[in-house]
Amino acid sequence: MKKVSTFLVLILILSFLTACQKTPDEQFVMKKDTERMIEQAAAQENGTPISALGIPDERYTYETSDTSGTVRIYADAAIILPDVERLPIVRVGMGKFTERDAENLYHLLCEGATPIALDAPLPKSYYQEILQGLIELRQSGNLDKYASLEELDAAITEAMKEVDQAPASAQVIEPEFSFVSKDGASEFRIGCLSANSKISTLIVTNSEDGSGSNRADFIRDIQDRAAYSSWIAGGLAPTLAFEQTLSPYFEPPKMSEQQALELATRAIEKLELVDFVCTGKRMAALYLPGVDASDAPRRGVYEFMFTRSVNGAAITFTNDDGMGLPDDPTTTAKPWMYERLRIFIDDEGIFALQWDSPYTVTEIQNESATLLPFDKIIEIFERMIVVKNEQAGDAVSAVRKQTIEIKEIRLGLMRVKEKNVGDSGVLVPVWDFFGTQAFGDITIGQDGYQSLLTINAVDGSIIDRDLGY
């Protein structure tokens, strides 16, 4: 648990430092002016084909350090390009989930289950299964998450009481795919009962204040909610849940990755999301450090990440959510999550689904953007990767010593927010430099989706993915 706490403190420190860093006084750091960037993207009548950027066929290699030698940077990176020759500039807005989306999600995720009300008492069979699990723990002598035998016995007594008080069956309802206003949001919410004991939840939420945090959330068994929410859906999967996949107690699914990907792809088709493509995949483990026993099994699930594609060019998936720091005084735009759809699969099928912040494509402003040559992008990277990280290292001794390894350079689209504009953004071509960042015995980015630097491919400006611009 100490290592987990250290990591969380480290993340808070790094987030604070990122928000407070001064903009380096370098001529290649362009003013972040969206209109100016769009004009620059149209500088050449037909834009710049990717094949004309001077991108080498071989891997990019590089090694450097800051002046103190405490920040060391290594690069041995594959260069990943989209399967198109030209990248667009696209204006997008904050979308909302529709009743059709809710209906498609329900039929995909709750097929064959009995629809039940989530605000009604759960059935006796649900608590009986919990009770049986506790009794088996007691018989095995394994305390699991309980601190003592007395605490486990108290949990058994409470479960027996819930069995006695629960109704014989759940309240069955007829699904209605309309949204109901609740606490500043409109919501579609339903439970699904299968095998007379397992309860799934599907909740689709549209924020009414235009905060850009709309979300569809499904989990197949609410008893798995704690492990899923805290370490996977909550955004810590890149370091904590992924780290557990390296444990000797990790138990991967028996289903092959290809079979799981095919299942996830069929799910996207059933949701009628014709413009979404798979832009990432990894494993995660259902395990709660500090709660589960150190030698407890780490139950593995596949995760597939889908993002929108426009004119054949996909939005690049990264670990950032785009919401920024809620109290950051430098923020000039509303919080707005990046659009992505994540599907988690185990041997039983879809274990969980999370779909964040749907976009609406309002206008393709430029079919083929004018892009900077690759050697200019590399020049910017080699200066900025040092400047960015030596500022953090100088500020707090706890994060001073760093080792950065760049393993992949990817060209794709990213949504940037516009200054002082609440519900409109622009998809622009960017270069992302993915890799790992090590601080002592903690390494961020082992899952492969930590962007350590993002450069606008049109004007060379540095983009803060946390803030979204």
Image (tube, rainbow, N blue to C red):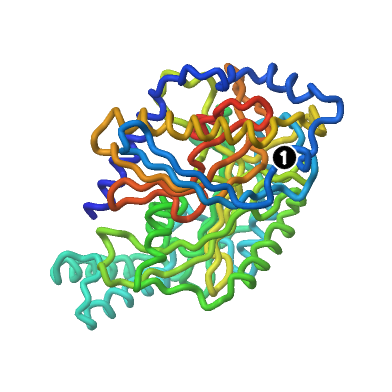
Q: Determine whether 69 is above or below 267 in the image.
A: above
Image height check: is 237 above or below 424? below
Query: Which residue is painted at 44% across and 50% down in the image?
Result: 445
Quadrant of the image for the C terminus? top right
Give the quadrant of the N terminus: bottom left
Residue at 71% x, 50% y is 276
Question: Dot 1: few (<14), some (14–19), or many (≥20) neighbours within 10 Å?
Answer: few
Residue 215 to residue 458: above or below: below
Q: Nearer the viewer, residue 312 or 162?
A: 312
Tell me the quarter of the picture where residue 403 sits.
top left
In the rendered image, which residue does mark 1 sit on?
Answer: 54
> Looking at numbered disc 1 in the image, what kind of residue is underneath it?
Gly
Please provide percent x and percent y for residue 87: 76, 38
Vertical relation: 181 (above or below) 31: below
Judge from the rendering whether residue 53 lies leftward or rightward of residue 320; answer left or right.
right
The foreground one among 90 and 343 is 90
Residue at 74% across, 35% down: 361
Left or right side of 209 for 161: left
Report the number of discs.
1
Residue 424 spot, x, y in % from top left: 66, 26
Q: Secondary structure at mark 1?
A: loop
Q: Quadrant of residue 379?
A: top right
Say which of 424 and 153 sits in front.
424
Q: Position of residue 35 (x, y in %)?
A: 69, 17
Between 175 and 337, the one lying in front of the other is 337
Residue 291 at least partly seen: yes
